[in-house]
Image: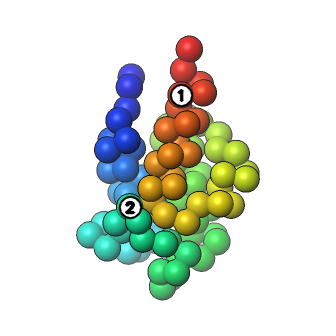
């Protein structure tokens, strides 16, 4: 199944809202998650773990630690999905 960047963004935004408690409307693709109130490393790691389970991928540690925005997350997930597809 092919997923577009928009599909991934919708799913990632939903997961981020659930894991951080921040309203989806406040989670724009370019907002720096690290600067948002209530977002700490544990919440980010929970978000990443749920994204990995949702897409059945394993994100590289260096990619995870470099994530700042949802747009960054979408790029990393999209790349991981393309690496596992034949």
Q: Which residue is mark 2?
A: 29
Q: Quadrant of residue 29?
A: bottom left
Specify how the rendered protein is coloured: rainbow
The residue sitting at the bottom extreme is 37
Is residue 52 in sight in this rendering? yes
| Residue 64 versus residue 2 in the image, above or below | below
**Residue that sits furthest to the right in the current view:** 62
Residue shown at 53% from the left, 32% from the top: 81
16 sits left or right of 44 in the view: left
Q: Residue at x 34, y 66 (%)?
A: 28
- Quarter of the picture containing the C terminus is top right
Residue appearing at x 64%, y 71% in the figure: 41
Q: Mark 2 or mark 1, which is nearer the start of the sequence?
A: 2
Left or right: 20, with 9 as reference point = right
Q: At x 55% / y 75%, what residue is drawn?
A: 34
Q: How many numbered marks appear?
A: 2
Residue at the farthest top position: 86
Residue 13 occupies quadrant: bottom left
Q: Is label 1 in a helix, a strand or a loop?
A: helix
- Crowding at label 2, few (<14), some or many (≥20) Cα neighbours within 10 Å? some
For residue 61, the mark is: none
Relative to residue 50, is residue 59 drawn left or right?
A: right
Residue 8 point in image, percent of width and height: 39, 44
Q: Is residue 23 visible?
A: no
Label 2 residue SS? loop
Q: Position of residue 78 (x, y in %)?
A: 49, 38
Residue denoted by label 1: 82
The CA span between labels 1 and 2 is 21 Å
| Residue closest to the eye, 65 or 39 | 65
């Amino acid at each position: 199944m092919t997923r577009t960047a928009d599909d991934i963004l919708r799913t990632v935004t939903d997961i981020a809202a659930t894991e951080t408690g921040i309203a989806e409307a406040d989670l724009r693709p370019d907002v720096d998650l690290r600067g948002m109130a209530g977002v700490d490393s544990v919440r980010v790691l929970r978000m990443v773990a749920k994204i990995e389970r949702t897409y059945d991928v394993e994100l590289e540690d260096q990619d995870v630690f470099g994530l700042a925005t949802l747009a960054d997350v979408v790029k990393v997930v999209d790349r991981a999905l393309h690496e596992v597809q034949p």
